[in-house]
């Protein structure tokens, strides 16, 4: 969805959401809610760094029956000559 000079991408699931205590650390390196040996906890951390490198933001909230992630990125106007 376009909002002026920003594009927003939203994606959600219906898997019960994110534990409230986990929302504040969700994007921290090596945080995982999976059992030991089931995940490295770096996927969302890397995603956040990539989005931020493009001057964007990524957020997560609980919505309905699941989690809602929103990525906001500035539109690229192209290079001027």
Image (cartoon, rainbow, N blue to C red):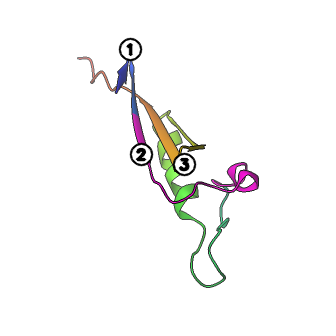
Residue 27 picture location, percent across and down: 63, 53
Position of residue 73 in the picture relative to residue 26 (left or right): left
Residue 50 picture location, percent across and down: 48, 48
Q: Secondary structure at mark 3?
A: helix
State which quadrant residue 22 falls in: bottom right
Residue 66 vertical placement versus 80 (above, below): below
Lower sequence index among marks 1 and 2: 1
Residue numbers of the magenta segment:
9-27
Residue 76 picture location, percent across and down: 33, 26
Callout 3: 10 Å neighbours few (<14), some, many (20+)?
some
Q: Which residue is mark 1?
A: 4
Camera-nearest label, 1 or 2:
2
Camera-nearest label, 2 or 3:
2
The residue shown at (57%, 57%) is 16
Position of residue 14 in the picture relative to residue 40 (left or right): left
Residue 25 picture location, percent across and down: 71, 54
Q: CA distance from mark 1 to mark 2?
A: 20 Å
Q: Secondary structure at mark 2?
A: strand
Residue 21 lies in the magenta stretch:
yes
Q: Which residue is mark 2?
A: 11
The residue shown at (57%, 81%) is 38
Q: Secondary structure at mark 1?
A: loop
Lower sequence index among marks 2 and 3: 2
Q: Are marks 1 and 3 in contact (CB under 8 Å)?
A: no
Lower sequence index among marks 1 and 3: 1
Q: CA distance from mark 2 to mark 3?
A: 15 Å
Towards the viewer: 48 or 14:
14
The C terminus appears in which quarter of the rendering?
Answer: top left
Q: Which residue is most to the bottom?
A: 37
Which dot marks residue 52? none
Q: Which residue is mark 3?
A: 48
């Amino acid at each position: 969805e376009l909002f002026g000079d920003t594009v927003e991408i939203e994606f959600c699931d219906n898997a019960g959401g994110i534990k409230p205590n986990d929302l504040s650390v969700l994007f921290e390196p090596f945080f995982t809610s999976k059992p030991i040996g089931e995940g490295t906890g770096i996927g969302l951390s890397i995603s956040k760094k990539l989005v931020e490198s493009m001057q964007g933001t990524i957020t997560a909230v609980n919505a309905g029956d699941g989690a809602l992630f929103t990525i906001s990125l500035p539109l690229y106007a192209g290079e001027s000559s």
